[in-house]
Image (tube, helix red, strand yellow):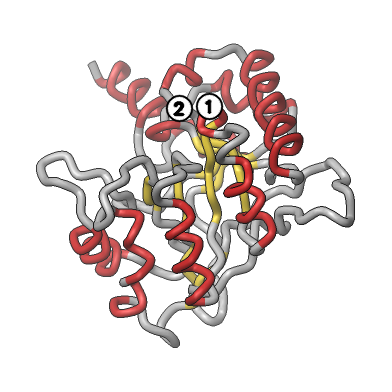
Amino acid sequence: MIVVGVVTLAHTAPAPFLFEWIEGERAVWHMPRRDPPTVYLTYDDGPNPTTTPDLLDVLGREGVHATFFIIDRHLTEDTAPIVARMFGEGHSVALHSANKSYMLKSAADLAGTLTAAADRIERLAGARPCRAFRPRGGWRSRAMYKGLRQIDYQLVGWGWMLWDVEIFHSRSADRTVSRLGSRVRSGSAPSVGMTRSNRDGPWRTPTRPWAKLQRPRFGFDATPSRPSGHRPDPARPRSASPMARLPL
């Protein structure tokens, strides 16, 4: 039973575990500690045409950059301008998965899937994402890490308990900010989803952290990651590398 438990946690733990000890810098679950102390905002699941533009408005007003882990099937001709706006406003764009089945892909299949998604983002939004991938729920495998190694991507996780998932309560911005505000430390990377259209949902969290994490206590930045090996058209906006510099 102990062996089963260790194997299960290695694949599903929402925190660094066995694979991360093996993979070293291929896995990123905590960002560099900087002076001033810095928190790295990350947003998953977009682009959401209902909420993402409002979120970008808030970040722009506050002068904050973030990293957006987007899902390939959410990128369409209609939502591509939102992703182009992310690039243009200095945010980082990276890849996310719509489901946990990516953990079951072979290394070659995963590498091909992520490369195709990056190609599609570049074609529709005019710039190529950073070489970073966040699997759904943090579910991963040795084959996933092998595939990431083939295309020189990093797996990016999040800080312990720094996510917006609520198992026993309805999600809300106030609950999310209250929990994150008590746990963030320099180098933390909170994870907030953008799938819901509720106007007071977790996406609105960025309007409030400054009350909890006031400057100069923390600055904000995008998560550092490997730059894309592609050379984009210099006339086009491109994702900053490391992922995007933003003080929160």
What residue is drawn where x is 43% and y is 49%?
158
Could you tell me if the residues under marks 1 and 2 are in contact, i.e. CB atoms within 8 Å?
yes
Q: Quadrant of residue 34?
A: bottom right
Q: Residue at x 11, y 46 (%)?
A: 169
Mark 1 and mark 2: span between their CA atoms?
8 Å
Q: Is residue 181 above or below residue 25?
A: below
Furthest residue toward left:
168
Q: Earlier in the sequence, mark 1 or mark 2?
A: 1
Q: Is residue 5 left or right of residue 27?
A: left
Quadrant of the drawing holding the N terminus = top left
Check the image and report above or below for 105 versus 174: above
- Which percent across, then down, holds residue 120? 70, 30
Task: Give neighbour class at mark 2: few <14, some 14-19, many 20+ (Cα, 10 Å).
Answer: some
Q: Pointer 1: what residue?
A: 73
Amino acid type at image mark 2: Ala
Task: Identify the residue position indicated by label 2 in the image.
Answer: 98
The one of 209 and 21 positioned closer to us in this rendering: 209
Q: Nearer the viewer, residue 8 or 203?
A: 203
Amino acid on which disc 1 is placed: Arg
- What residue is shown at x 74% (from left), y 42% (from top)? 128
Classify mark 1: residues with Cα within 10 Å, few (<14), some (14-19) or many (20+): few
Residue 161 x %, y % = 29, 51
Instruction: Tell how many labels.
Output: 2
Q: Residue at x 50, y 71 (%)?
A: 220
Query: Residue 3 at what x, y percent from top left?
Result: 32, 18
Q: Nearer the viewer, mark 1 or mark 2?
A: 1
What is the residue that sits farthest to the front in this orientation?
Answer: 78
- Element carrying mark 2: loop
Relative side of 85 to 156, left or right: right
Q: For residue 109, which quarter of the picture? A: top right
Q: Looking at the picture, how far across and down is residue 243, in whole percent?
A: 65, 56
